[in-house]
Amino acid sequence: MFGAIDRKADFAETHPLSAAARKRAQADVDVLGAMFDALVARNRRMSSSRVRGYQASTFLGARGVRAGLADAVMAPNQAFQALLQSL
């Protein structure tokens, strides 16, 4: 049909990963990464290149706010109340 049976075991832990399977997986990861960058950029009102520049770093608390990835640091109950007020 579509040769799907040829790729059935591509990512099975009992078989070595072929170069072709790795290339397909990397292409998927690249597409998903670009989608994520675009989503964060749109929702945080920043450029995709700025998001990519963070290189998947993590930002805790005030660092996340300074990076433009969060609006504020607050206790969970305060965050929930702020969410309710924004609706």
Image (cartoon, rainbow, N blue to C red):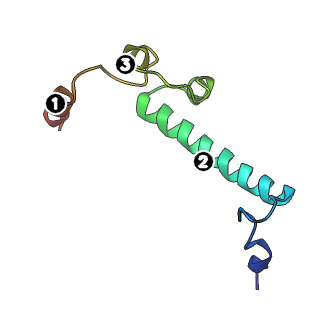
- Can you tell which quarter of the image residue 84 is in? top left
Local SS, label 2: helix
Q: Residue at x 61, y 42 (%)?
A: 33
Q: Is residue 49 left or right of residue 3?
A: left
Amino acid carrying mark 1 in the image: Asn
Work out how far the residue at label 3 is from the one at label 1, CA to CA, in angstroms. Answer: 16 Å
Q: Is residue 31 left or right of residue 36?
A: right
Query: Could you tell me if the residues under marks 3 and 1 are in contact, i.e. CB atoms within 8 Å?
Result: no
Structural crowding at the residue carrying mark 1, measured as other residues with C-alpha within 10 Å and reported as few (<14), some (14–19) or many (≥20): few
Work out how far the residue at label 1 is from the one at label 2, CA to CA, in angstroms. Answer: 33 Å
Task: Name the foreground residue: 33 vs 7.
Answer: 7
Q: Residue at x 73, y 73 (%)?
A: 8
Which mark, residue 77?
1
**Counting residues from the N terminus, which is met first, the one under dot 3 or under dot 2?**
2
Work out how far the residue at label 3 is from the one at label 2, CA to CA, in angstroms. Answer: 26 Å
Q: Is residue 19 left or right of residue 2?
A: right
Amino acid carrying mark 2 in the image: Leu
Q: Is residue 62 left or right of residue 20?
A: left
Which tag is nearer the camera, tag 3 or tag 2? 3
Screen quadrant of the N terminus: bottom right
State the image coordinates of residue 67 (x, y, percent, origin top left).
46, 17
- Residue identified by numbered label 3: 61
Query: Taking 12 as reference, is 66 above or below it?
Result: above
**Counting residues from the N terminus, which is met first, the one under dot 1 or under dot 2?**
2
Task: Name the foreground residue: 65 vs 48.
Answer: 65
Local SS, label 3: loop
